[in-house]
Image (spheres, grey):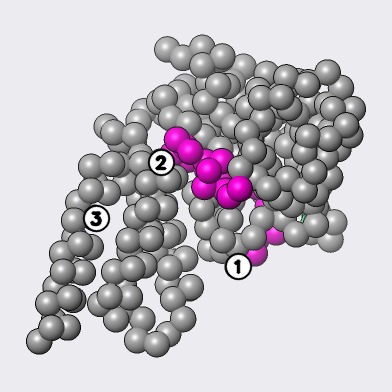
Amino acid sequence: MSTIDDLTARIRYVLVRTSHPGNIGSAARAIRTMGFQRLELVMPARFPDREANALAAGADEVLESAGIHEDMIGSLAGCSLALGLSARRRGVNLPEISPREAAQQVLAAAARGEQVALVFGNERTGLENEELARCHAMVRIPSVDDFSSLNLSQAVQVMAYELRVAMLGDTPVPPPLHEEPPADAARMEQFYVHLAQTLDDIDFHKGREPTTIMLRLRKLFQRAQPDERELRVLHGILADAQRMAELAKGQ
Ligand code: SAH
């Protein structure tokens, strides 16, 4: 049985391309009040910054231990589940869930020992499509349609609160879906690179733009959540296809 501390340690809040250091501070405070510690910052515009500390209002430890990353993949290291928070649906065809449903999924994964990320976008532009494409589902706080965007740190607070409530409740944790934990974000990314390369090698695109099909394929594999062993088989298939393409070229 995992304790609340075990569970919270497996959950990280990722802020992508945050413009205002004050929002980073407020987000640190928001997660700290709900018992969380782990903040990961992807390309923050200004950090560290006095404004962040001022608005953290004592949650300085969260800021001090925050990881800083040059890209989103780095911030997801070790995670097998990433949920992207977005006010708008955007072009990515991801399943959309509520913060409450998200909290259940996050806790179920954390209870199985997996690491999980909740990903928040830039204040003005939100999460880009390619950032959302690295997520397994999109979480939308059900705000009104004509004024749907919350302040970044307030969105963090809503999600952290739902997680806290879910953790304090005694909702039974669903049984594991897999015997093996799903492969983490970095391994999935390696696989997508190999897949894209192989599709090129076998001339799958035939001059068409690969972006849409790659997003579709990502969605398929994100849904399947392959484990390490399954990924090895897939890499093996791709390598053989590449070898055959190479042979065919020689003829
Ligand atoms: N104009 C941007 C708003 C960004 S607000 C957009 O349309 O996406 C900054 C971040 O706060 C968002 O990227 C998202 O992570 C979070 N956020 C704000 N409102 C939200 C909502 N209603 N549901 C889910 N996340 C929200």
Mark 2 vs mark 1, foreground winner is 2
Which stretch is magenta? 70-90
Which residue lies under the disc numbered 1? 91
Crowd tier of the residue under label 1, counting other residues whose Cα lies within 10 Å: few below 14, some 14–19, many 20 or above:
few
The correct choice, above or below, for 208 with respect to 173 in the image is below
Mark 1 to mark 3 CA distance (whole Å): 28 Å
Left or right of residue 163, residue 157 in this image: right
Query: Image quadrant of residue 244?
Result: bottom left
Query: Quick one: 250 or 127, which is closer to the camera?
Result: 250
Query: Quick one: 152 or 170, which is closer to the camera?
Result: 152
Residue located 30% across and 41% down the image: 227
Give coordinates of residue 27: x percent, y percent: 77, 33
Give coordinates of residue 96: x percent, y percent: 58, 52
**Which amino acid type is marked by label 1?**
Gly
Give coordinates of residue 159: x percent, y percent: 68, 35
Counting residues from the N terminus, which is met first, the one under dot 1 or under dot 3? Answer: 1
Which residue lies under the disc numbered 3? 235
Mark 2 to mark 1 CA distance (whole Å): 24 Å
Mark 1 vs mark 3, foreground winner is 3
Residue located 36% across and 67% down the image: 196
Q: Secondary structure at mark 3?
A: helix
Crowd tier of the residue under label 3, counting other residues whose Cα lies within 10 Å: few below 14, some 14–19, many 20 or above:
some
Which residue lies under the disc numbered 2? 184
**Which amino acid type is marked by label 2?**
Asp
